[in-house]
């Protein structure tokens, strides 16, 4: 998958460099404040086939990432960053719901997600019908994704998609997006700030 990043929309406002800081400095590079047009709503199924909605995670700060299990490069790196971020948080990781939402629900079945995420049971991978996955991606989080045919590949197609981590408040409302990838230390700092509110 090629690295494919687009601006979220005109409704996104760049985080101010002079924003209030908590006890520790938090990163500002690539961090955007989100408007209420980002609802964070989704109705999908988890790796056990159990229906899961955004309301199920109320009370926790969500760390949400969109990707797919057949992604050859960017997604595996970012998923490992998610896992390492939870390690970085220590006991505070219990305040976070790390959510992976598939942009390739046709191939990312519950069993595929179960196999792929066996390395870290803390991450909650979600999939569903194409319509439900598209609604979560395009409506709830305004994430760009599109199929790209690969006629000379056994995979047949890949999915180009926006690379971003989303952090919600405890009610599930997306607060910020971190564009273009991040590292565990920076994500942990941003999550700690939201947890402390």
Image (tube, grey):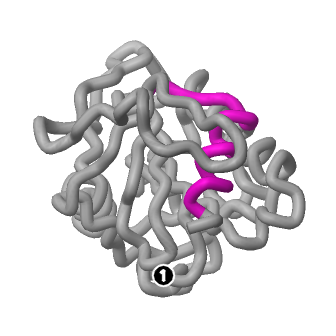
Question: What residue would you read off at disc 1?
Answer: 52
Percent coordinates x, y for residue 64 in the rendering? 50, 55
In the figure, 156 relative to 47: above or below?
Answer: above
| Left or right position of 148 against 86 | left
Residue 131 quadrant: bottom left
46 over 37 or under it: above or below = below
Q: If the image is split into quadrants, where does the C terminus sit?
A: bottom right
Task: Tell me where residue 44 appears, x and y as whole percent.
Answer: 41, 74
Is residue 69 visible from the viewing direction of this image? yes
Q: Position of residue 182 (x, y in %)?
A: 60, 29
Foreground residue among 149 and 27: 27
Magenta span has 131? no
Point out the stretch of residues depicted in magenta.
Answer: 179-194
What is the count of numbered marks?
Answer: 1
| Residue beneath the point at 56% across and 43% down | 21
Q: Nearer the viewer, residue 94 or 47?
A: 94
Q: Is residue 159 visible?
A: no
Q: Please tell me whether residue 115 is drawn above or below residue 197 in the rendered image.
A: above
- Residue 193 magenta-drawn? yes
Residue found at x 46% / y 21%: 1
């Amino acid at each position: 998958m090629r690295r494919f990043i687009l601006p979220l929309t005109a409704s996104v406002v760049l985080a101010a460099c002079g924003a209030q800081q908590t006890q520790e400095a938090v990163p500002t590079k690539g961090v955007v404040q989100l408007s209420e047009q980002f609802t964070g709503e989704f109705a999908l199924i988890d790796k056990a086939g159990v229906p899961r909605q955004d309301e199920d995670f109320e009370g926790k700060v969500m760390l949400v990432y969109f990707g797919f299990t057949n992604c050859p490069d960017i997604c595996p790196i970012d998923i490992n960053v998610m896992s390492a971020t939870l390690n970085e948080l220590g006991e505070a990781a219990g305040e976070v719901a790390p959510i992976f939402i598939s942009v390739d629900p046709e191939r990312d079945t519950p069993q595929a997600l179960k196999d792929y995420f066996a390395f870290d049971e803390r991450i909650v991978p979600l999939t569903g019908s194409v319509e439900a996955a598209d609604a979560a991606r395009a409506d709830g989080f305004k994430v760009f994704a599109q199929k790209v045919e690969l006629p000379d590949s056994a995979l047949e197609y890949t999915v180009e998609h926006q690379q971003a981590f989303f952090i919600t408040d405890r009610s599930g409302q997306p607060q910020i997006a971190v564009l273009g990838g991040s590292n565990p230390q920076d994500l942990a700092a941003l999550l700690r700030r939201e947890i402390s509110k």
